[in-house]
Amino acid sequence: MRRIYINEDYCIGCRLCEIYCLVQHSHSQKIIKAYKEELPRPLARVLVEEQGYLSFALQCRHCEDAPCIEACITGAIGRDSNTGAVLCDENRCVGCWMCIMICPFGVINMNTEGKKVASKCDLCYGEEEPVCVKNCPNEALVYEER
Amino acid sequence: MKRDDSKYLIIGNSVAAVAAVEAIRSKDSTGRITIISDEPYSVYSRPLITYFLSGKVDEKRMFYRDGGFCQRNKVVTILGERVMALYPQEKKVVLENGRGFHFDRLLLSTGGTPIIPQIEGKKLRGVFTFTCWNDARQVRDFIESQKIRRAVVVGGGLIGLKVTEALVELGVEVTVVELADRLLGATFDRKASELVKNYIKKFAISVLVNNTITGIKGENSTVCGATLRDGAVIDAQLIVFAIGVRPNASLAEEAGIEVNRGVIVDEQMETSVSDIYAAGDVAEGWDTLMHARRPLPIWPVAHRQGSIAGYNMAGFPKKYPGGFPMNSVELCGLPTISAGITDADQEGYEILQDYHPRERRYRKIVLLDNRVVGAIFVGNIDRAGIIIGLIKAGIDVRQFKDHLLSEDFGLLWLPQDYRKHIVEGPGIEV
């Protein structure tokens, strides 16, 4: 399957990936509205870690042997048979946070906006390419089959 | 093959069974699989029964896999039937109604049995245990039909407190009675227990520790109160026992399979009898932190054990090095996660902590020889999985120990080779 790969040497820590991701997963899909009017603010599903000159953007790795799928008590987290992406069906999620407990990358977050649900990267389902990859100015994120 | 003969026979119908079916079918698309369960339901999620009780999860969302799961995987299901005997030599099980099933390979995933203390009044109407969907249905119906206002939950562990939460949401006043001197004693340390206790008291939940009930009072064969060890009497119309679950291993035991507390399994989830496997709450596998065999009745372990059993049953050898306890439970809106050894006061352990009782936030990391062996998160559980991943990986944390509890702690602090391995690899084992 195609996955997002990280080139940490190229990451400049600009956090554009976080902004595009947040807007992509907002109701309005408009940057100003997403940041100023949607309250609580929608969540980005990618996180830039930064320390000194080292930085990288991290999102769900869509693991082949995904521990979150095993830990999910509802069956909400599963693998999409078309893309291979690990997706969370937010209608079925009850917010037990077993996935947060077990994800060794720490890339699943609590979304407490409405009904409490686990929030994670969906590889921008339906898009040709995830927006974090598409809008990375330095190809620090690439989307490819390896 | 005769009608009731199977290549793969599975007893029990929860997560270990599902994981086994999925593993078997990834390797063998035709071998006949039969599941026998004493519950009348197609595969549902046991941990959701408290959500069902409170009404947060409806009938439809209780099912762990969609309705087509068995058909798609060509699984024959025998539901609502109890297996009475297992004959390992003949490779056969017999149901209560006398019907026999032969198998080539058998998986015992019969789960656990709730413990009920031998006290007066335990047979009264209004006394329940709480481990399966029928329990949740019966408690809900009882509350609705009898207009129950007050309940006693016996046991302040995870199940007890989740039931308590659901009852409170239904408008029932609850007293939790715990034998130990604190709540969640098996998974939490004293500080975390205290935080949870003080927090849930705000929801009109009474908590009695160092106490237990010694009798149940009845009126017209229905519960009307509970007598405590200290002699006090609590007025209640509903009693729920949540004092623990033991592996449901009697079938294996009577068949001569080696059983300690649970059915003893090796790294391939095979029991002492070849071609008979066990997985989930009934099994006693390896605890990688305690370096001992013990039952680990938690969901992700059951899933993994079921899957490993399935691969081996299908003839594809796979090993499971073992697991360790971990739990994630949100109580009345307070998220908590605990893993591994959380309450270590012996010499040699090093404790890191970040404790803010007034804000109800507590994070604790337990180290042994510079390796993380346990953790507690209350209130703030963000990225807890990274710490728990370190427990599993057994990484030496000396170089970044001071950062483990900092707000910006992340993968970036980890040794580059470990980080590269987990970030770039196509997937990871649990």
Image (tube, coloured by chain):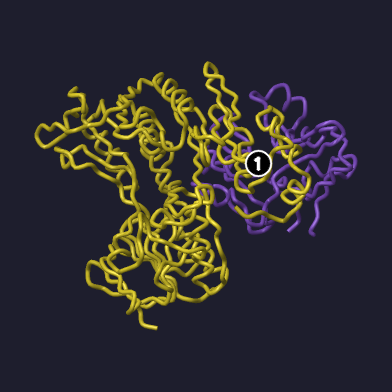
Figure chain in yellow: B
Q: Secondary structure at mark 1?
A: loop
Q: What hue does chain A carry in this figure?
A: purple
| Relative height, residue B85 to residue B376 (above, below) | below
On the question of residue A120 being in view, the answer is yes
* Residue ID at (76%, 38%): B412
* Residue ID at (60%, 34%): A110
| Relative height, residue A87 to residue A137 (above, below) | below
* Residue ID at (63%, 41%): B371
User: B356 or B107, which is in the foreground?
Assistant: B356
Name the image quarter holding residue B90: bottom left
Residue type of the residue flagged with mark 1: Lys
The furthest residue to the bottom? B1
On the question of residue A96 being in view, the answer is no
User: B417 or B107, which is in the foreground?
Assistant: B417
Residue that badge 1 annotates: A120
* Residue B337: % across, % down: 53, 36
* Residue B17: % across, % down: 44, 60
